[in-house]
Image (cartoon, helix red, strand yellow):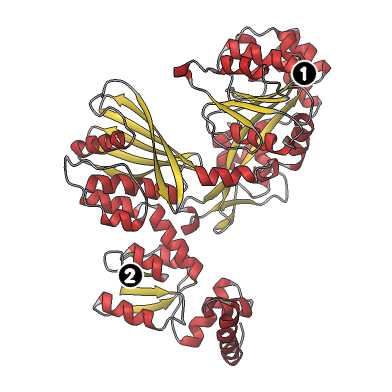
Amino acid sequence: MMTNSTFHIMLQQATKAAKVNGLRAIEALEEASQLSPENFTKQLAENFSYPSLTLAQMIALRPAFEIISFSESLQRECVLLHSDTGINFVFADIFNQSLPSWAAEHIGGSFSTYLAHHADIAAYLAKHEEDTRTVQTAIGNVVITNQSANAIEELSLNMIEGDASPIIKLVRSTLYDALKAEASDIHLETAPNGLVIKYRLDGVLSQVGAISEPQLAEQVVSRIKVISELDITEQRIPQDGRFRAVYRGRDVDFRVSIMPSIHGEDVVIRVLDKQTLADQASGLRLDVLGFDAQTMQTMREQFAMPHGMVLVTGPTGSGKTTTLYAAISEINHGDDKIITIEDPVEYQLAGVLQIPVNEKKGLTFARGLRSILRHDPDRIMVGEIRDPETAQIAVQSALTGHLVFTTVHANNAFDVIGRFLNMGVDPYSFVSALNIVVAQRLLRMVCKHCAESVELSEKLKHLHIPPGVTLKRGKGCGMCRGTGYKGRRAVAEILVLDDELRELIANRASVRQIKELAVKKGTQFLHHTALNVAYQGETTIEEVQRVAHMV
């Protein structure tokens, strides 16, 4: 900590520097101080005779959005909190002298004023926004109505607050909060007494709200049908649709699946942020997916082969397609003809011919793959092998001088072999075509903002953690919505085929024999790879247990 006089001099210098550099005075002062955010806030509070609050202290208090709204708090970089002693007004920019007086006008009574770092206020507001405060507000104000409205044009707080129809407000709030939370899917599940709202965040479903009136639930589902251009009178069969909205100036697609249930209709909405996907695709490489160095080296060697088959396997949502996109992005130098057939096309890749499957029009994976082979390709990506016909054509394509990238659903790299053989593919042809199998999963990462060291629980003592390893867990903060996890990374089990392995598979050797030989040749099982990530303090043992199914 520096002396008050030194800080005062720095304060004057920062004010002048801010005008020159185009920064806010508070930002220039923090940059010049070279203090940590916590120490900077303490120094600032001491000099201006304000008490200060940390993020952890703020999270322990309840927001007073009924007095100063969420949107106003976000706009003015402040927040009003309920405490045992009364109302606390928390702000960050000490140079904004008008803010406390503005707060006094809105509060209309006594309150205490605190300083906090602007990042902590942003994190606190993010936590409560991502905890679906707007959804909860909408739910609380919903009344039954038969009013219909036009398709969604824009998702914003101002638009949500201005919606006249509570049903429309609820739907828009749900979509808005899902985008803010970076949810991949929205689940609306019907129950005997209404509707449960869930988001899939980092691969895990989390309940964020509920509607306790069955009639309201029906109207929410009907609203989604209207904007998806589906039949609102049909409730007996599944329906698929899509709609589009604008969020922060960019287009977002929503794919809708409606399924009848015993209590009504369930809705799942897949979120496809086009701009985010485009940004990801433009910089998509294997090293941004989280694979370790050895895995990436092996994958790159195999992806550079002139012909053969690259198989990526894993459950739905494990990042298989993203890995293939990354592979294609790395080998796409403009010298080869690269064609993909996908269902649907998720990323748009420059210089790549991408064909969407359209089964209603007769364009299946098998038919599309046959046509691709007549289009003089060098590299082919098949989104998924679902049937024996597609499997046969893909193998033949790999044997006739093409490099084929594809995915298949299997639990691990070794189950892929049985999956193909069960589809009637000739074993010798299959192993001759196959270069590499990548079985991958996505691990949630420990939130860096609230990570702390932990001891291994009693039920996991049998894992025999190597000496010197420090395990970590996120205690929960505003940046991770209290989950302790923020972001995901890929881990993989790699099986590279050589002559010995090919001979075993062609002779239909047992899986145990194939595994033993693969391990001797350097294959590392998925749970071992995932454990190494935990040993590095990047994820938890519990997450490894959830994803990789350790015994």
Which of 266 and 229 lies nearest the eye of the viewer? 229
Q: Position of residue 149 (x, y in %)?
A: 24, 43
Farthest residue, direction front: 375
Say above or below: 333 vs 308.
below
Q: Considering the numbered disc 1 on the image, is that residue within a helix, a strand or a loop?
A: loop
Q: Name the residue under label 2.
A: 83
Dot 1 alpha-carbon crowd within 10 angstroms: few under 14, some 14 to 19, many 20 or more: some
- Count up the numbered dots: 2
Q: Quadrant of residue 423?
A: top right
Quadrant where the C terminus sits is top right
Identify the residue shown where x is 53% and y is 17%: 364
Q: Please tell me which of labels 1 and 2 falls first in the chain.
A: 2
Q: In which quarter of the image is residue 74?
A: bottom left
**Amino acid type assigned to the residue bearing label 2 in the image:** Ser
Q: Position of residue 109 (x, y in %)?
A: 24, 79
Q: Where is residue 87 in the image (x, y as percent from the top left)?
A: 31, 73
Say above or below: 511 vs 60.
above
Q: Name the residue under label 1.
A: 401
**Amino acid type assigned to the residue bearing label 1 in the image:** Gly
Q: Can the viewer see residue 169 in this picture?
A: yes
Q: Can the viewer see residue 418 in this picture?
A: no
Which of 267 and 153 lies nearest the eye of the viewer? 153
Identify the residue shown where x is 66% and y is 43%: 290
Farthest residue, direction right: 499
Q: How far apart are marks 1 and 2 (CA)?
A: 70 Å
Q: Considering the numbered disc 2 on the image, is that residue within a helix, a strand or a loop?
A: strand
Numbered disc in front, either 1 or 2:
1
